[in-house]
């Protein structure tokens, strides 16, 4: 691994010059300086404290590359290649100007691998946390076809459209999620901290409390007892156990099957998967990726185990000479419209165009479904907030009607 060394040399005019160089060791620095015509006086290592970002980039938890970072990265990469810059020079510039510290570090390592004779796709394949299988496969296809700059632009467009779809869903669901969280927090604070105060007041007055108030106080006592702590720990353990189960093939299949059967949510999940399938397949085909390899990648990145298994099943039939549309039609996942458009695309040789149109259609369908869903959820959440908070307040203030009599 290269390090930075400071040096002091004398030139041919006997002038003393100081500076720094990056090299593998001190001997390499000295040799390089001698080749430049200098007389070496001293070479020493330059110690520099790593920045916080550099330290974090070595921790697996922080080794993440956002879709936005890769989109900008791909566009900059494509521009430099199109301008005729050598690949190693492009990587060196990207390593310096990329904002994501981990991605910059990875790019620096890739530069050395490419200088050592490796292909760009092989160098990227060593860093699966930074570059997905889709990204690497498209780069490999671009290298084979000599259109690396075009492929990088297609990657950027693909990621940008996926990011826009995710952004629409997140922004639409932000308000309902915040409302639900506020309701839960308010209810927890009232039951845990406010109810005990009223409980002490009621006990001191020795009055008979209404049934709703008794139920509320019982819930408060339970939540503040050891049983409440056990319930919370058990609930969180169940959540983590279920998340671990979802990572298995059987768990992913069960969860995705359940999602597809749910009203509204199932339709939305299916449309998201179809949009992703169509866009990814179209992008891979337009980049020159072989169809069987493209289907493998699409199956791995489908985001839904039901869709993934349907694609893998279709791949086996396609290997034996079938068209793409026919085996897909045997699955319940793909609607007739998708099958027909893929079939027309195969017949006319414009499969990537048809896939793009399918993706655009389902993108708009997802946006409309999310908007309709939020319009239903928002009033329901307001009612939920009113019932929970209002119910607690009414339960607390019902005994107050007898408070004057009790004081007398």
Image (spheres, rainbow, N blue to C red):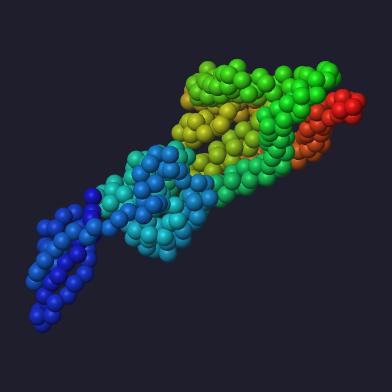
Quarter of the rendering containing residue 92: bottom left
* x and y percentages locating residue 202 in the rendered image: 78, 24
Residue 350 can be seen, yes or no? no
Residue 403 or residue 97, whichever sits in front: 403
Residue at (42, 46) in percent of width and height: 139
* x and y percentages locating residue 61 in the rendered image: 43, 39
Quarter of the rendering containing residue 17: bottom left
- In the picture, measured across the screen, residue 150 lies left or right of residue 201, that is left
Residue at (43, 43) in percent of width and height: 62
Residue most extreme to the front: 408
Residue 163 or residue 286, whichever sits in front: 163
Can you say which quadrant of the picture contains the C terminus?
A: top right
Above or below residue 48? Residue 326 is above
* x and y percentages locating residue 301 in the rendered image: 52, 34
Above or below residue 229? Residue 136 is below
Residue 65 can be seen, yes or no? yes
Residue at (48, 25) in percent of width and height: 319
Above or below residue 321? Residue 156 is below
């Amino acid at each position: 691994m290269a390090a930075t060394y400071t040096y002091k040399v004398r030139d041919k005019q006997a002038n003393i010059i100081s500076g720094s160089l990056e090299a593998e060791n001190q001997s390499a620095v000295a040799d390089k300086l001698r080749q430049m015509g200098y007389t070496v006086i001293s070479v020493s290592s330059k110690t520099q404290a790593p920045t916080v970002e550099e330290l974090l980039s070595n921790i697996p938890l922080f080794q993440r590359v956002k879709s936005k970072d890769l989109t900008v990265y791909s566009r900059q990469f494509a521009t430099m290649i199109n301008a005729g810059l050598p690949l190693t020079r492009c990587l060196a510039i990207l390593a310096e100007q990329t904002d994501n510290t981990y991605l910059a570090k990875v790019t620096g390592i890739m530069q050395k691998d490419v200088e050592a004779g490796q292909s760009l796709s092989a160098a990227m394949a060593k860093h699966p946390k930074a570059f997905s299988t889709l990204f690497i496969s498209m780069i490999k296809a671009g290298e084979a076809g000599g259109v690396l700059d075009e492929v990088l632009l297609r990657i950027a467009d693909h990621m940008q459209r996926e990011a826009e779809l995710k952004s629409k869903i997140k922004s639409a669901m932000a308000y309902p999620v915040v409302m639900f969280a506020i309701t839960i927090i308010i209810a927890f604070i009232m039951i845990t901290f406010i109810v005990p105060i009223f409980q002490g007041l009621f006990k001191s007055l020795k009055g008979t409390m209404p049934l709703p108030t008794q139920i509320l106080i019982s819930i408060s006592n339970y939540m503040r007892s050891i049983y409440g702590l056990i319930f919370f720990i058990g609930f969180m353990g169940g959540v983590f156990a279920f998340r671990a189960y979802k990572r298995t093939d059987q768990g992913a299949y069960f969860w995705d099957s359940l999602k597809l059967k749910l009203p509204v949510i199932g339709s939305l999940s299916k449309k998201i998967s179809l949009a992703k399938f169509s866009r990814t397949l179209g992008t891979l085909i337009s980049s020159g990726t072989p169809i069987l390899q493209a289907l493998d990648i699409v199956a791995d990145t489908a985001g839904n185990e039901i869709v993934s298994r349907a694609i893998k099943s279709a791949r086996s039939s396609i290997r034996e000479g079938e068209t793409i549309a026919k085996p897909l039609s045997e699955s319940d996942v793909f609607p007739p419209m998708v099958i027909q458009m893929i079939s027309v695309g195969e017949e006319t040789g414009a499969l990537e165009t048809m896939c793009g149109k399918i993706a655009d259609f389902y993108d708009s369908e997802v946006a409309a479904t999310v908007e309709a869903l939020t319009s239903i959820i928002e009033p329901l959440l307001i009612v939920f907030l009113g019932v929970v908070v209002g119910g607690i307040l009414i339960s607390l203030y019902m005994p107050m009607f007898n408070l004057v009599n009790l004081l007398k």
